[in-house]
Amino acid sequence: MSHQHAAQSAFPTRFIFAMCSIFLAASLAGCAGQQGAPAGTTASESSASDATAQESSASNATAQEPATSGAAVPETAQTAADFDAWTADSASLRALVDYVQSATDESSDSFIPPEERIAVFDLDGTLMCETYPWCFEYMVFADYALNNPDYNAPEDVAAVAQEIVDSAWDEKPNGMSTRQASAAAVAYAGLTPQELEGYVESFKSSPAEGFSGMTRGEAWYRPMLQVVTYLQKNDFDVYVVTATERNIVRALVAGALDVDPSHVIGTEYGYTATGQGDQEDTDYTFQPGDRMVFDGSYEGENAKTSKVDAIVREIGRRPVLAFGNSSGDASMLSYVLANEEHPGMAFMVLADDTEREYGDAKEAAEDRADWEEKGYTVFSMRDDFATIYGENVEKAPVKATAE
């Protein structure tokens, strides 16, 4: 519009600016609503969903009583909505957002091409609960071995499963990771991966022990799910790299994370074709009618440096972001920090919340000191998470915890 035309307008300039501002704000709000709506939803469904989410967030903050709720850390309306499960002014979250903003800014010296934006996440204790009373993998195995009417567990397999149940809410038995994986491989022998995933899907609906208002399949850390979604919105390729068996994780992730099964890397059990018998893989040709089933063998736990091996072998690019929660993830995080082409960041989720979760204050203090010395950024469940699991979920210690 020319200055002459503007002067001749019947509307005062101030009014025009005000109207433009209103239209712009309405347009941005509409865009934000569309971004948050699941694919296939209508505008009215999206609005209803947004309203429900806001009510859930408000209820969450009241029920779990965080020190400070909301997400004042991010600067834009988009990122503020992305992180409403985080406490305000979280320095650790701010560090992640700063990194992502720099990595996605083409004018920045720290710009990372989309094909090289790779983020790797551990599962248990990083993305989801591992305290009901043990991680999901242990509990689904114990249930399969002891309670499945269609399976008669060998004595040694049943003994490991019973040890898991008997040690609930106590110290984790030494060497249990290896014993559990070996016994589970035997227990699942003869199942197809799809049959195991079906059992996992059913077990997901069982109550999360030690909590009220939540099933095992719902036991995801909401702040960490928001991190995954935020990274994906910014063109980061997300992988789950875990010590839990791969097919179990694929079933767990389904419906909770937008992560393709090919992006799940975990511990491996051996496979065989049903018609193969004792023949080696190199001597047998898969036949029509064959099925691939677990053969009872255990390939070794995907933990510590094995995670780095798996990343090199299966991803083929060095990640720039890594998220973990224990010493089993330290090699993966250190590998990311040593990225010379694109300086990376490494984050550890600290189990220091004793009110809403089963954290250990002394152990958490030791972990924090060790991790910060190694250059990892700490996400404190107590201080950084406005909510952990969401609305109406409360810690409800079982009898064994009170004794």
Image (tube, rainbow, N blue to C red):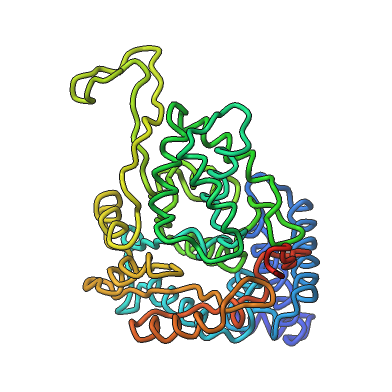
Q: Nearer the viewer, residue 367 or 15?
A: 367
Q: Position of residue 7 (x, y in %)?
A: 70, 86
Quarter occupied by the C terminus: bottom right
Q: How many tags in the picture?
A: 0
Q: For the view shown, which residue lies furthest in the left direction?
A: 282
Image quadrant of residue 328?
A: bottom left
Image quadrant of residue 198?
A: top right
In this view, 338 is above or below 264: below
In this view, 319 is above or below 161: below
Q: For the view shown, which residue lies furthest in the top direction?
A: 288
Quarter occupied by the N terminus: bottom right
Q: Is residue 1 visible?
A: no
Q: Position of residue 18 (x, y in %)?
A: 74, 82
Q: Position of residue 86 (x, y in %)?
A: 62, 76
Q: Residue at x 61, y 63 (%)?
A: 169
Q: Is residue 62 visible?
A: yes
In this view, 63 is above or below 375: above
Image quadrant of residue 309?
A: bottom left
Q: Residue at x 52, y 84 (%)?
A: 362
Side (left or right) of 325 relative to 301: right
Side (left or right) of 213 relative to 401: right
Q: Position of residue 224 (x, y in %)?
A: 55, 66
Q: Nearer the viewer, residue 389 or 34?
A: 389
Q: Nearer the viewer, residue 177 or 8?
A: 177
